[in-house]
Image (cartoon, grey):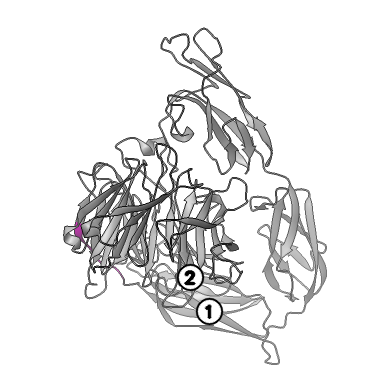
Amino acid sequence: MLVKLLTLIVVFSLAATLLPAQEPSSPVNLNVTPGSLTLEVGNTSTLSALVTDANGQSIDDAAVVYYSRARRSVGVNPTGRVEAYRPGEFVIVALVPTDPEASPRRAEPILQVEIPVTIPNPPISDISFQKTQGSFYAETTVPLAVQVQDTSGVQRHDVEVNFTTSDESIAEVNRFGHLHLRSIGEVTVTATAEAATTAVSIIVSPNPASTLELTSTVDEAATGDVVRFSTTIKDSTGQVVNDMPVQYAVFGESDASIIASGASAQIARDGRFVAERSGRYTIISTVGTRAVRRILDVTPRDVTRRIEVVGHGPVRDRHTSDLWVWEGPDGRDYAITGTWGADGHAYIWDVTDPAHMSIIDVVRVDARTVNDVKISEDGRVAVISREGASNRRNGIVLLDVSDPLNGVSVISRYDDQLTGGVHNVFLYKNHVFALSGGRRYDIINIEDATQPTRIGRFELDTPGHGVHDIWVEDGIAYSSNWTDGIVAVDVGGGDAGGSLQRPVQLGRAAVHPSGWNHAAFPYRSQSTGKFYLFGGDEAFPYGDETFTEGQPERAAGWIHVYDWEDWENPKEVARYQVPEAGTHNIWIENDILYVAYYNGGLRVVDISGELMGDLYQQGREIAFWEAFDPEGFVKNAPMAWGPQPHKGHIFLADHNSGLWAVRLQSKEPGPTRNLGEPR
């Protein structure tokens, strides 16, 4: 989703006043009380608005609308009732609109005021130790882990935790939460967060380690390759000791040709190592007072290729939204693209020859935005989403695309309980997953496309929840839920008894603490068999100037990579982050990640092998390309919206210039420049 912020009237007090002379019946002042709010999480308060004319007389029939600048943290309804969801500093906007029928967030204001809302953190109610079972040995160090929860039931990571021990001659805790076991004996460790406290008693045994052996899966690797190190511990009798804590460290020198290499490598607590720079590295394994080391050579990753532009289908009079490319029943290749903030158009393209793409049909529906477009598995039915309909009945439209060369026609429309606007859809086995007003998704049976029928729905129950995007694969739906992260739901393919009629939640990965979670793509690695979830951020944190009419836009955010083999325990293991740009939609195929990186253009990334660390810095980027168009809707302003590989080409929808077809050139002979190494 590309969220457009309106340029609003700047006010410096809670009373907005128009300076030019007005008719006595015209609104001149808007006063809102209280002028600021402080609410506990879960509490509510109601704002009162007074609109007056130039004579100070109340205008009782003046429309006042409210909206929240952070609606997933603090909500406000049409009557001015404010509800606190999450801690922080936020703003509620009250305005008198030029058009009372306009959407509050897009209304042009005659008058406007801002009401600051402060929501303090709830007090801590509980603290508990995690992973304190097992054996403890003298002369070792163990990292302590605690879980802190407040009275609202939220796990907190921003609270200072203090540790103490009952006998520092046996054990002490440093300021980083590391428990250093000095000698044998029994000791109590206490953790305190605000008024909450917990304690655990541990017995420290003699250290049995006599010899150490450090091994690795390989002796030579490339940047970005994950190498696993393992330490074997034996006691004085030669018996293996399996439960002792091991600490790993790495030092080394980057290749001499690399200038100012920066941080060059990392190793995790479990012995997984990855390097961002080529060079020679020494890995050290420490158990108590004993240590062992091993050397590893790392060469540059050699994956860089060039991108060649094949064709361009320009759309220059409006913004382009998403795309879908498919092979039709006639064997020809087609694409469908939507439009954003315009007049409800969807374009159908013949892309059989990507060098000469052409629009062969246009569908126009009652909407401002056709944000999403999808095609059925058999290539015969398209579904397009609607937002901003004139009658506020949005919903979806099903199209017959079985013979695009001879015209595309509307099969049916469906808007039952979807009037709030459908921003995203997905087609899965003759069922449409349609987002409703950014709150939930409905599951609609289209086996008879002339009579769509809702058969199920899924919605979170968290305060201020939202949903932006959904992708369904192998009977599991992955929804991207802003602050609530990525939610995996069994709709027939999981082991939780879920179905299309009765979805059942499997697990959740919280992607970004700022609530940037925007899109997700599930993928099982072809090279390792590991199951990953790729989650993309979307954010525009640079202020209103980012959206000045006719100016290029700037986004932020990155791709989060989760190892999600266990639904209850998703682990974020890697990221792909391009500085000073932000992600939109993604696609993965054949161990290659394709990212529409908004103002960063199209990015093509090698995701073969096990993934760990910063993929961008490791030189995994195969290629990038930016759609500069001097005649674009915003001139020379790349804004990549969505990528899709198809039959050897990469098709790209660009928000400012339309549809593009590019392809990766063959790799040039010999080593290529590694974009991750600053030579």
Expressed as whole percent of the image width and height from the top left, the position of residue 560 reads: 48, 60
Residue that sits furthest to the top in the current view: 55
Comparing 23 with 555, the one in front is: 23
Q: For numbered disc 2, what is the local secondary structure?
A: loop
**Magenta highlight on residue 305:** yes
Q: Secondary structure at mark 1?
A: strand
Q: Which residue is mark 1?
A: 229
Compared to 330, does 18 lie above or below? above
Count residues near mark 1 (Cα–Cα under 10 Å), then give few for <14, some for 14-19, many for 20+. many
Residue 234 lies in the magenta stretch = no
Q: Is residue 617 above or below residue 17?
A: below
Task: Please tell me which residue lies in front, 4 or 209.
Answer: 4
In the visual, does 115 lie left or right of 397?
right
Residues shaded magenta: 303-311
Judge whether 187 appears above or below 511 on screen. below
Q: In the rendered image, which residue does mark 2 sit on?
A: 474
Q: Residue furthest left?
A: 356
Q: CA distance from mark 2 to mark 1?
A: 34 Å
Q: Which residue: 29% across, 53% down?
A: 409
Q: Earlier in the sequence, mark 2 or mark 1?
A: 1
**For the point 48% across and 65% down, which residue is it?**
533
Of residues 353 and 608, which is closer to you in this image?
Answer: 353
Amino acid type indicated by mark 1: Phe
Q: For residue 185, what is the image quadrant?
A: bottom right
Which amino acid type corresponds to the residue marked 2 in the rendered image? Asp
